[in-house]
Image: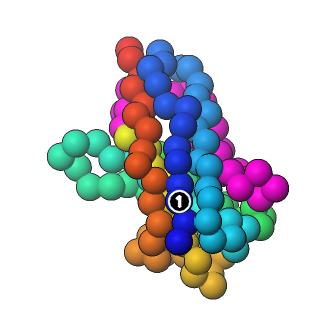
Amino acid sequence: QVQLAESGGGLVQVGGSLRLSCAASGRTFSQAAMGWFRQVPGKEREFVAAVSWSGGSTSYADSVRGRFTISRDNAKNTAYLQMNSLKPEDTAVYSCAASFSHLRLPPINSYSYWGQGTQVIVSS
């Protein structure tokens, strides 16, 4: 079992920045790929970014590449999502997730542990 808890969401103006954190406890965090996803009411959950267990590999959705940075600190059992140049369309509930797949950047359907989410609102 892995427990995940997100923090760092809030209200920010267009062009601003936020850093989300995902604190993990339970099963060995350093063995899991970590992902960030977001969801808007009435829409499907959307992949945002992922980082491999070592932090050496990352992937991003086209909509956030160049603006968001995913990272992790295995010593602190925490993953991060640095969000810069925020846009109104980034408004969503952001959730982190863990995958213990053997792949460095596993498919979305392999993420089996999820946090509760943190709300991000970007105002224009």
Residue 62 appears in the rendering: no
Question: Residue shown at 52%/48% (left/top)?
Answer: 5
Residue drawn at (41%, 49%) of the image = 116
Relative side of 91 to 49, left or right? left
Residue 66 quadrant: top right
Q: Nearer the viewer, residue 57 or 120?
A: 120
Question: Which quadrant of the view contains residue 51?
Answer: bottom right
Mark 1 element type: strand
Q: Nearer the viewer, residue 100 or 56?
A: 100
Q: Residue at x 53, y 59 (%)?
A: 3
Q: Is residue 68 above or below residue 58?
A: above
Is residue 71 highlighted in magenta? yes
Q: Quadrant of residue 87?
A: top left
Which residue was labeled with disc 1?
3
Q: Tell me where the magenta segment starts and ends, as one range.
A: 67-92
Q: Residue furthest right?
A: 75
Q: Quadrant of the C terminus?
A: top left
Q: Is residue 57 magenta?
A: no
Residue 4 location (% of width, % of height):
53, 55
Left or right relative to 36: residue 84: right
- Residue 93 lies, in percent from the top left, at 37, 41
Residue 17 picture location, percent across and down: 59, 25
Q: Residue flagged by tag 1: what amino acid is it?
A: Gln
- Measured from the top left, where is residue 97 in percent x and y? 50, 60
